[in-house]
Image (cartoon, grey):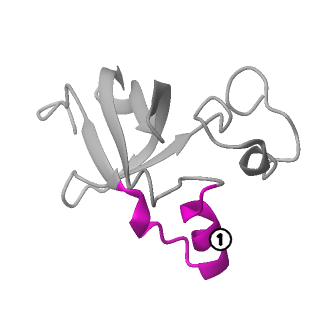
């Protein structure tokens, strides 16, 4: 993921049953019907539509995520890349839980309503 090895597309298939935040109670909540509902939707899928570079640095990946059977657009802002193997990326994602089909109870994890772009 450098000037010599530019990524042109990204596709991920994530097993939501394997969520591990290091806190068992939170993991159980994330896997529950309120959030990911892994009993009915064990997979999350992402397919890029656009890969954004700032010069030679991979800056973002935009595309569609499917979670709980609902697909919508998202943007992953790339914070860093594992230079040893060029495969592991650290990213941030602003995700609207209600738009993603999660229940209002799941959305209440964030006490302030979010409007506009991520971080606003």
Looking at the image, residue 101 sits to the left or right of residue 112; the answer is left
Name the residue at the right extreme.
Answer: 112
Q: Nearer the viewer, residue 108 or 82?
A: 108
- Image coordinates for residue 60, horizontal then vertical, percent: 42, 30
Camera sees residue 55? no
Q: Is residue 14 above or below residue 24?
A: above
- Disc tally is 1
- Image coordinates for residue 76, horizontal then vertical, percent: 46, 35
Q: Nearer the viewer, residue 38 or 26?
A: 38
Residue 87 is one of the magenta-drawn residues: no
Q: Residue at x 78, y 28 (%)?
A: 120
Q: Residue at x 48, y 42 (%)?
A: 68
* Image quadrant where residue 64 sits: top left
* Image quadrant where residue 107 sits: top right
Name the residue at the left extreme.
Answer: 4
Looking at the image, residue 89 sits to the left or right of residue 23; the answer is left
Query: Which residue is tagged 1?
Result: 26
Q: Residue at x 73, y 33 (%)?
A: 119
Q: Nearer the viewer, residue 48 or 42?
A: 42
Quadrant assignment for the N terminus? top left
Looking at the image, residue 94 sits to the left or right of residue 76; the answer is right
* Image quadrant where residue 5 sits: top left
- Image coordinates for residue 15, horizontal then vertical, percent: 34, 58
Name the residue at the front extreme.
Answer: 40
Q: Nearer the viewer, residue 118 or 99?
A: 99
- Image coordinates for residue 42, horizontal then vertical, percent: 38, 55
Q: Residue at x 54, y 63 (%)?
A: 31
The magenta-colored residue range is 15-33
Does dot 1 land on a helix, a strand or a loop? Answer: helix
Camera sees residue 17? yes
């Amino acid at each position: 993921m450098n000037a010599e090895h530019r990524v042109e597309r990204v596709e991920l298939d994530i097993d939501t049953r394997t969520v591990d935040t290091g806190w068992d109670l939170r993991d159980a909540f994330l896997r529950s019907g309120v959030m990911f509902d892994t009993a009915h939707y064990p997979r999350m899928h992402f397919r890029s539509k656009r890969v954004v570079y700032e010069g030679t640095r991979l800056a973002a990946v935009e595309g569609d995520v499917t979670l709980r059977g609902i697909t919508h657009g998202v943007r992953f802002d790339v914070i860093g890349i594992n230079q040893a193997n060029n495969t592991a990326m650290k990213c941030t994602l602003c995700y609207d839980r209600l738009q993603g089909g999660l229940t209002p109870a799941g959305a209440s994890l964030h006490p302030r309503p979010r409007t506009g772009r991520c971080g606003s």
